[in-house]
Amino acid sequence: MSMNPFCEIAVEEAIQLKEADVKAKKKDSTAEVIAVSIGPKQCSETIRTALAMGADRGIHIETKADVRGDYIDMQPWGIASLLKGVVDKEENVDLVLLGKQSIDSVSLVCSTVDNCLIL
């Protein structure tokens, strides 16, 4: 399973923001890029891609593998709630970047719902 191109843009932007922060401070930054993926076991490949791009660490919320399309059929509110849970659990989250839409179900509601939940 490959990374959604819209999510790839978000990961790249996060890495560039972190690098700019390091250059501005001319020392080690406390900024951290955390990639999050929700889906069956094969979605961990997406985390590995983000790590190879330069993310510091990844979180994989694994869904049931025995249900066809479990992660595709999850409603945007459910996915947004899971992502909010990650943000709430992590310390000092200043910025959350998301891809603008999914490419499998072409859902663009999740980022909108996340904006409402996180604010």
Image (spheres, grey):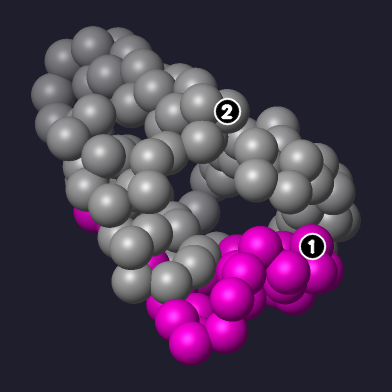
Q: Nearer the viewer, residue 101 or 66?
A: 66
Which residue does the image show at 33% across and 26% down from the upper left? 15
Please report the bounds of the magenta region as a residue range. Answer: 57-86
Label at residue 6: 2
Q: Secondary structure at mark 1?
A: helix
Which residue does the image show at 23% across and 12% down from the upper left? 23
Which residue does the image show at 70% across and 32% down from the upper left? 100
Q: Amino acid at mark 2?
A: Phe
State whether residue 64 appears in this view: yes
Quarter in which the C terminus is drawn: bottom right
Where is residue 87 shown, x and y percent of the image? Answer: 55, 64
Q: Relative to 1, is 67 above or below?
A: below
Instruction: Find residue 26 and report its image quarter.
Output: top left
Q: Is residue 90 magenta?
A: no
Instruction: Find residue 14 and report its image quarter.
Output: top left
Q: On the picture, is 72 further left or further right than 87? A: right
* Residue receiving disc 1: 76
